[in-house]
Amino acid sequence: MTMNVTSEQKAQGIFIVTVAGSLDSNTYKEFEKKIDVLLSEATELIVFNLEFLTYLSSAGVRVFLKARKVLKNSGGQVKFLNLQPQIKRVFEIINAIPSMQIFESTEELDRYLDAQMKKVIEGED
């Protein structure tokens, strides 16, 4: 199967990465290269939109875990959006994502981002 990855900068240091197709041993290197570009000190948040991801292997999981580790070490975060049931189950089985890091809808994500930006503007963060 194939995979498609697109990224959109929502604000300074905040990216939405949409992954579609199959993230497996044949496609994870391409995915990792695209994510590595975003893993800089200036990146504060990457939200992975997995609405169109149909398959996830352990190779793909490792890329997500690497991104989370790198961003955490620099004070950033990784969150997830629109997980398909089979993808959510993979993460649950390996206990890789706390539920507070998963957004069920774009609206929920937008509320979170608005609150975070408001904190910065008001000098709370």
Image (cartoon, grey):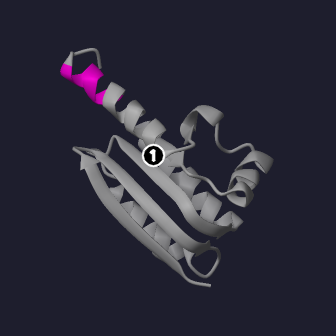
Q: Residue furthest bottom?
A: 1
Give the amino acid type for the residue marked by disc 1 in the picture: Thr
Q: Quadrant of the N terminus?
A: bottom right
**Splitting the image into 4 quarters, where does residue 38 fall?**
bottom left
Residue 8 vertical placement versus 11 (above, below): below
- In the rendered view, tell whether residue 40 sits above or below residue 18: above
User: Helix or strand or loop: what does disc 1 sit on?
Assistant: helix
Q: Give the range drawn in magenta.
A: 116-121
**Is residue 119 one of those drawn in magenta?**
yes
- Residue 19 visible to an observer of this rendering: yes
Give coordinates of residue 77: x percent, y percent: 44, 39
Q: Which residue is drawn at 44% across and 40% down?
A: 107
Is 42 displayed left or right of 99 in the figure? left
Location of residue 85 by image quarter = bottom right
Can residue 37 be seen here? no
Is residue 96 shown left or right of residue 16? right
In this rendered view, identify the residue nearer to me: 27 or 10.
Answer: 10
* Figure quadrant of the C terminus: top left
Identify the residue shown where x is 50% and y is 43%: 79
Quick check: 113 left or right of 60?
left
Main SS of the magenta part reads helix
Residue 8 percent coordinates (x, y): 31, 58
Badge 1 is on which residue? 106
